[in-house]
Amino acid sequence: MIIDCHGHYTTAPKALEDWRKQQIAAYDANLQPHFGSALKISDDEIRDSVEQAQIKIQRERGTDVTLFSPRASFMAHHIGNAQVSERWAAICNELIHRVATLYPKNFIGTCMLPQSPGVSPANCIAELRRCVNEYGFVACNLNPDPSGGHWREPPLTDRHWYPIYEAMVELDVPAMIHVSTSCNACFHTTGAHYLNADTTAFMQLMTGNLFRDFPTLKFIIPHGGGAVPYHWGRFRGLAQDMKLPPLSEHVLNNVFFDTCVYHQPGMDLLLKVMPVSNILFASEMVGAVRGIDPETGHYFDDTRRYVDAFPGLNAEQKAMVFSENAKRVFPRLNSVLTARGLQ
Ligand SMILES: [Zn+2]
């Protein structure tokens, strides 16, 4: 079985984007409430939006099920206020639930959170609870920088974040650390901000003691962990200079990396440098990079191809990367897979 732990609904019907524009216009005009009309998307429109995209690609690449969340760049937590984010997150998560209900064997939901700059993430607990308890979602995406590239929140190890961690631990769901659109012109959203955030989050977690307070809390750092695997010697060396415990004990029981790395040498490095037990298969399709690599003739984001071509994994290790690690890191996944006849 191949579980893709990182996919977004980037192909959602245009009505979703229109709804959001209406909401933002209403907020800007100081209209109360800020919400616009109800979102109208039919089941057929949902089918059209995924059958020739994510589902076709799953079939072509031989992957089974995708952990599916709202489009990351559309989360845009910096827009509006907490009330705006709450309504937007609820709309987006409900749509993911509808996709996963129409295609229970293809998609399992993970939610976005209604974060807002300067607002305690305690405001996200109700939505997280709803998504886990009512929709059967298995994880959330946590944005370490809801200001959209200006980094105004405290580090992830700060007590500011503890309320959402307490809820995650109670509900037994991990978070993928995932920023959204950059509104800082210095940082391109997917080329710089995403990778910077992955690297930044790891360093925050490394220099703090979060996992002493939350030993079962788990994070997935996407996009292959940003610069972390490539600079693993730097991180280990810094940890040593700072008299931190070995990183294998200090963070690697709680921090995992996905395989959204879009070329063979990068995947080889990830698989060689990081422990196999810390790597989860993912492609982020249909996502940031949609073209075909002229050097290989294959889609850049066809990450299964790179994992398969890496010579250093035996069958058991490959199964860990493709599915078994995910079942451990997303503790609710096993029962969902069983309930849907997927295992
Ligand atoms: Zn993503």
Image (cartoon, helix red, strand yellow):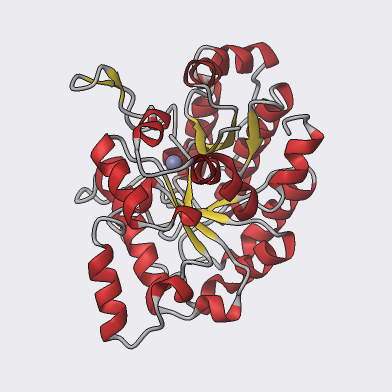
Quadrant of the snapshot with the N terminus: top right
Residue 142 percent across, percent down from the top left: 52, 55
Residue 187 percent across, percent down from the top left: 23, 49
Query: Can you tell which quarter of the image residue 120 is in?
Result: bottom right
Residue 278 percent across, percent down from the top left: 48, 56
Indicate the quadrant of ligand 1 in the picture.
top left
Most foreground residue, 257 or 168: 257
Residue 115 left/right relative to 144: right
Residue 252 percent across, percent down from the top left: 47, 66
Q: Residue at 72% x, 30% y: name it.
A: 342
Query: Taking 230 as reference, is 223 above or below it?
Result: above
Residue 90 left/right relative to 264: right
Most foreground residue, 46 or 86: 46
- How many numbered markers are drawn? 0
Res. 38 in view: no
Res. 158 in view: yes
